[in-house]
Amino acid sequence: MKKIAKQLAALALAALTLVVPAGAVTQDGQSETWFDGVWALIDTLGLKAENDPYVLQNYINKYLEEHPEEMYNVLNDILSLLDTHSMYLSSEEYSQGFSTVEGFVGIGVGMQQTVGGVQIAEVMRFSSAEEAGLAIGDIIIAVDGTDTSAMTNTEVAELLRGEEGTTVAVTVRRQGRELTVTCTRRQVNQVYVSNKTMADGVEYIKVSAMGSQNDWTAFSEIWEGLDEKNTRAVILDLRGNGGGVIDVALKMANVMTEEPNVYLAGTRWREDMGGLETYYSTGGGLPLNRIVVLVDGGTASAAELLAGSLQDTGAAMLLGETTYGKGQGQFHIDLINGDKLVITTLELELPEQGGYEGVGLKPDLMIENRQVTVNAARLTPLDTTETLRYGDQSDNVYAMTERLALFGLIDEATDTFDGAVLDAVAAFRESYEMAPALYASPDMLLALDEAVQTLDGQTYLLDDQLQTALEICKLAAAEPQRYTPLPDGGWEKN
């Protein structure tokens, strides 16, 4: 089905905020020593434990000597007394709950089984496979000299695995020739940043998570290239972004800020760990006419830090729904048995709003997406054999706009082909990869009617938030550009 027929909304509530991991716990095999090590970390790092050291420790040590299998429940009971975000997790639970930040060790390729052999279907950004020049479509025919032409996906993947820092020689067949490259196995993290141009001068940037420095690298590359596109307005979509690495959020806020020495945010640690740490902008952000940040109930922690910083400093307006409200950060600590201790160590503070834990951020413009149920039988019949042009006024224009309104491309149906209808027609044509045109052709009307028939009886959400942001940014992009691109790739402020 064409993409415009799939306008569905999803809500992700993986609310997390990461700080750099703080080492590992060691133990000598005794249950009380094991617990002593974990509780020492809780006492040393826990935000709420500063004034209540070693609470219940003697009692718990004695209990665990008699019931070592209760370690998991006891630790989580204790951690729940501190705050709602601290927890003790098995390695499996951690992988499920924090998949956006965990990553894996490998060369960074996705593979698929084909009749010609195991083919590379994905080359991950910033991976050693990308650096070595492996490409989508390559057929893997050998790994470290072992013939893989008759192997399965799983068998080839096993050969590619190995310890971090080791190398592997990968031989592929590409367009009839063989090519061997050497890749170093290392930590690979998915990139959660993407972008597209939505209108003249309007760029859409989606940040789904801030899982690693790779996301910052991808974002900075996009941002640094905005001047080459003569971008004048940006839509930053943080909906469903559960957060991630605090440092990544602060770097994004900094690069989007024009003036130097602007107070961006603060992180409040325990007093014995430094107290309040503040962050100020270096300045030099591209002078755009408008930045609109999309947020919802799934926008959490580090994503809220970025959105709130831009809102409080006046760099951007927030549009959407109240955010999740996770304003505390955690250390994610590796334990000797492979489990994880996630412990709250700091609170996040915004320049004007202060802390937002349990409260969230209120958008400047509150908009909820609409739920729509398609009933094709109730629509005005659409004649798909004629061409509708700007200025036309007819029942068929009304029938067309009824359908365009179902996709959120226009606010309401009308019988007059005006400028708003023209924009809606252009958006539909673009989504169906049709050539730009200042009219609604029979093939476009047929595709529109078929799209509606495909969705008949279905209920889905219209992305009114994105559409509103787009309209705001189009108006801003129509204003004079505030900078001039230079031949050397830079820009100067007008």
Image (cartoon, rainbow, N blue to C red):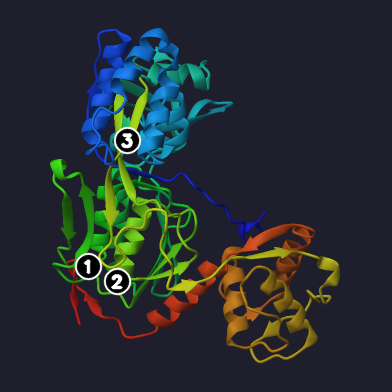
Q: Earlier in the sequence, mark 3 or mark 2?
A: 2
Residue at the location (15% across, 41% down)? 273
Label 3 CA crowd tier, 10 Å (few <14, some 14–19, many 20+): many
Q: Determine whether the residue tagged by mark 3 lies in a helix, strand or loop.
A: strand
Residue 377 image point, x, y percent: 86, 68
Q: Earlier in the sequence, mark 1 or mark 2?
A: 1
Amino acid type shown at disc 1: Gly
Residue at the location (13% across, 67% down)? 261
Label 1 CA crowd tier, 10 Å (few <14, some 14–19, many 20+): some
Near-viewer residue (271 or 385) = 271
Q: Which residue is mark 2?
A: 315
Label 2 CA crowd tier, 10 Å (few <14, some 14–19, many 20+): some
Residue 161 image point, x, y percent: 37, 20
CA gap between label 1 and label 2 equals 10 Å
Q: Which residue is mark 1?
A: 285
Whether 61 is drawn above or below 107: the answer is: above
CA gap between label 1 and label 3 equals 34 Å
Q: Determine whether the residue tagged by mark 1 lies in a helix, strand or loop.
A: loop
3 or 2: mark nearer the eye: 3
Amino acid type shown at disc 2: Ala
Whether tag 1 and tag 2 are in contact, CB under 8 A, the answer is: yes
Q: Determine whether the residue tagged by mark 2 lies in a helix, strand or loop.
A: loop
Whether 34 is drawn above or below 299: the answer is: above
Question: If the image is split into quadrants, where does the C terminus sit?
Answer: bottom left
> Can residue 419 be seen by looking at this rendering?
yes
Tell me where residue 125 sits by quadrant: top left
Q: Does residue 273 appear to the left or right of 372 in the view shown? A: left
Q: Which residue is mark 3?
A: 343
